Amino acid sequence: MQEDFKEPNQINWIHDIIAWGGNAFLHNFYNIHYTNVQNLPEKGPFFLLPKHQSYADIFLEQRLIVENTDQRPYYVAKDSLPGILDKVGVVRVTRKKDIKALPKEERRDAMQKAKEQLDYMNWAVPELLQKGNIWVIHPEATRNYKQQGIIDMDVVERIVSYKTEDTVFVPLDITYHTPLDPMGSRAMSHPFAKDVRANYDYGITLDVKYPLRTDDPKELCEYLADSIDLLVAK
């Protein structure tokens, strides 16, 4: 029941340790560039909608928002991510493809869990938007490192349904100028990974696109595809 729901847990010092620790690691190896930051609203409510490339994205998104809005964002993320993220304002969802990957005897329980998670998300996202908060949601609903990702129209329709009168949608194009995903197993184990990371030509660019205000999911989907090269509409 909605009256039993509580806001996502967000412990500020844990959030900051994860954000700054992750950025310190990345800055040790990469040149990180933030462009068109003036397009980021000074405060919520808004959705940041990044191209999802790597597990490293969360550190970069956190820093971008905290440094430019003095707010800490909330996230919608897949259920299998580490438990520590429950302390930084993550709302978990179980994806259909994750349920299909389970043995048949486990699917019924997983479907029930997914429904409960969806009910909670349907309450939490608009509830916190109304209080001026910021949500980060990846519109392709999965990672595609340096590859085209198809925008999930179900995700787009849902976030548009959550918006308040003041909510805007901000696309974020994240580009990794590196041959290997910095948080991927190949990069971690590659014998030349450190040399690759240290090369000045390799870096990460975060380009903040102009905010869109709309009530039309199709318009938002098309705007995301036009704004971010590696996102395509169905």
Image: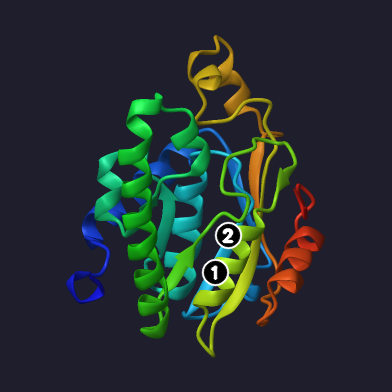
SS label for mark 1: helix
Place of residue 12 in the rendered image (x, y in percent of width and height, measured from the top left): 24, 62
Q: Looking at the image, which residue is at 58% across and 27% down? A: 197
Labels in figure, total: 2
Q: Amino acid at mark 1?
A: Ile
- 182 lies above or below 68: above
- Left of 105 or right of it: where is 215? right
- Density class for disc 1 (Cα within 10 Å; few <14, some 14-19, many ≥20) is some
Q: Which mark is residue 129?
A: none
Pinpoint residue 120: horizontal percent, then vertical percent.
33, 64
Q: Quadrant of residue 203?
A: top right
Would you name the residue on which mark 2 appears? 155
The residue closer to the viewer here, 180 or 88, is 88
Query: As drawn, which residue projects farthest toward the top?
Result: 191
Whether the residues at callouts 2 and 1 have beta carbons within 8 Å, the answer is: yes
Answer few, some or many: residues within 10 Å of disc 2's Cα (few below 14, many 20 plus, some between 14 and 19). Answer: some
Residue type at mark 2: give it: Val
Residue of label 1: 159
Q: CA distance from mark 2 to mark 1?
A: 6 Å
Q: Nearer the viewer, residue 97 or 111?
A: 111
Against 106, residue 83 (above or below) is below
Question: Which quadrant is the N terminus positioned in?
Answer: bottom left
